[in-house]
């Protein structure tokens, strides 16, 4: 059983930057970030595998950067130019297998990830 622990959430004004980190207790392949705003379904933000194959949701492309340290089993999400619509609880997720070969916005994409963190709140004020 792999445990994931997120850190780095917080509150800030629009236009600011924030870095989220997630540490896995064991070796994983694909790691990703998902987010869920109140009243909305959880959505994929970005994923990365051990070979640094990366996917971004279109809403965060060019603003967010995901990176992974395979030796430390950590994944980081650098979020720049934050918008109020980015406010959500952000979840780290991981799987021992490869990242799904599907778009991040594919329905049930998250089902490929058996391991989840508890989430960290990101609040963005306008």
Image (tube, helix red, strand yellow):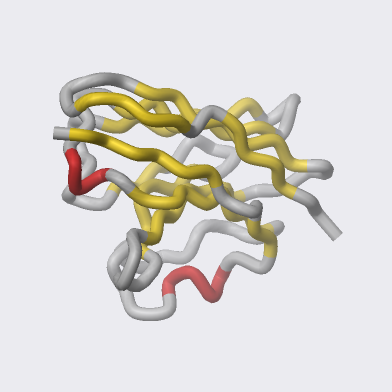
Please determine whether, in this image, residue 72 is positioned above or below residue 44. above
The image quadrant that residue 72 belongs to is top right
Give percent across and percent down for residue 28: 71, 48
Furthest toward the bottom, the residue is 107
Give percent across and percent down for residue 5: 70, 41
**Residue at left offset 17%, top offset 36%:** 83
**Residue at left offset 43%, top offset 72%:** 109
Q: In which quarter of the image is the C terminus?
A: top left
The image quadrant that residue 123 belongs to is top left
**Residue at left offset 19%, top offset 48%:** 85
The image quadrant that residue 106 belongs to is bottom left
* Number of numbered tags placed on the structure image: 0
Give left or right: position of 46 versus 31.
left
Along the viewing direction, whichever of 7 and 27 lies nearer the viewer: 7
Along the viewing direction, whichever of 78 and 49 lies nearer the viewer: 78
**Residue at left offset 60%, top offset 39%:** 50
Give left or right: position of 108 versus 96.
left
Give percent across and percent down for residue 6: 62, 39
Please determine whether, in this image, residue 62 is positioned above or below residue 31. above
Please determine whether, in this image, residue 27 is positioned above or below residue 94. above
Give left or right: position of 63 versus 41.
left
Furthest toward the top, the residue is 16
């Amino acid at each position: 059983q792999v445990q994931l622990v997120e850190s780095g959430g917080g509150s800030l004004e629009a236009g600011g930057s924030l870095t989220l980190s997630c540490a896995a207790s064991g070796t994983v392949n694909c790691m990703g970030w998902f987010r869920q705003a109140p009243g909305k379904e959880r959505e994929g933000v970005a994923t990365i595998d051990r070979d640094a194959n990366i996917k971004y949701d279109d809403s965060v492309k060019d603003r967010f950067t995901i990176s992974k340290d395979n030796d430390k089993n950590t994944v980081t999400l650098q979020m720049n130019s934050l918008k109020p619509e980015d406010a959500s609880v952000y979840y780290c997720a991981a799987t021992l297998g490869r990242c799904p070969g599907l778009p991040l916005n594919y329905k049930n994409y998250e089902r490929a990830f058996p391991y989840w963190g508890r989430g960290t709140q990101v609040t963005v004020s306008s």
